[in-house]
Image: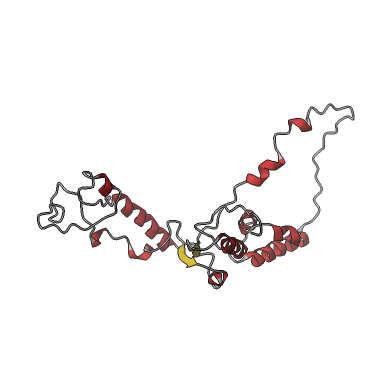
Amino acid sequence: MTDEYETMTVPELKDLLRERGLKVGGNKSELIARLLDNEDSDDTESTPVVSDVEVEEFDDDFDDEFDEDDDFFEDDDWDNIHTARQKPVLDEETAKALAFRAQQKKKQPAFRRQEWYRYKRLSRSSWRKPNGLQSKMRLNRKYRPPMVRIGYRKISSARGLHPSGFEEVLVHNLNDLEGLDPETQAVRIGARVGNRKRLDIHDKANSLGIRVLNQRKIVRKGDL
């Protein structure tokens, strides 16, 4: 059973722990140890139960209409089963702050560059503060779009957090994964990291139960 657990990913192990009502925090080795302890306790506490329900017996000439060719399930379908990703463990205050930040974002206007509607090249550019002496946008006229101001800033307790609630940590190598808390922190791999090192980071983060926010689907070819 230990070898079977070793081949499973951290999200799959956590799904088993949730089904048994156990704690889901920790790295892969701790999750496996928790599952094995639970199995040992189940074996010691289990007692044989004699059922009084009568079992209906079927004749040997019973015609089974089930055909293996008509089986609805295929082995290939099990490879595409979705496994839930790591979720953050949030306290009540942080969860409320994230919900409040989402409400603030809905009310925030889209900050557009001055006269973005007039020139196509300006519609594709980001925000620029107007500096013209007679700029009606700088003078804050009502018929012009609003400017960026400090009052539009979000709640401080949720500032810098990922929308899921994780604290983002930028990593570039395997050493950056050491000492991270998988319950509150998630990693984002740097854009200049190559596929070889990126795959190593994916494997180690999966074994530690750390969520990768920008995980890519990389096809292993050659010596990868």
- Name the residue nearer the viewer: 63 or 127: 127
Q: Residue at x 66, y 67 (%)?
A: 29
Q: Residue at x 66, y 56 (%)?
A: 222
Residue 19 image offset from top left, x and y in percent = 63, 53
For the C terminus, the image quarter is bottom right
Image quadrant holding the N terminus, namely: bottom right
* Closest to the observer, 220 or 31: 220
Q: Is residue 61 above or below residue 180?
A: above
- Residue beneath the point at 56% across and 59% down: 195
Q: Position of residue 209 (x, y in %)?
A: 59, 63
Frontmost residue, 84 versus 195:
195
Judging from the image, the colouring scheme is secondary structure
Q: Residue furthest left?
A: 134
Q: Residue at left 81%, top 42%?
A: 52
- Residues 5 and 141: in front is 141
Residue 126 pos. (x, y %): 29, 54
Position of residue 189 in the picture relative to residue 202 (left or right):
left
The quarter of the picture where residue 42 lies is: bottom right
Query: Which residue of the protein is positioned furthest toward the front in this rendering?
Result: 222
Q: Is residue 125 left or right of residue 178?
A: left
Q: Tally the marks.
A: 0
Quarter of the image holding residue 216?
bottom right
Q: Is residue 67 left or right of residue 29?
A: right
- Looking at the image, residue 88 lies above or below residue 76: below
Q: Point out residue 197 in the picture as x, y percentages from the top left corner.
A: 58, 64
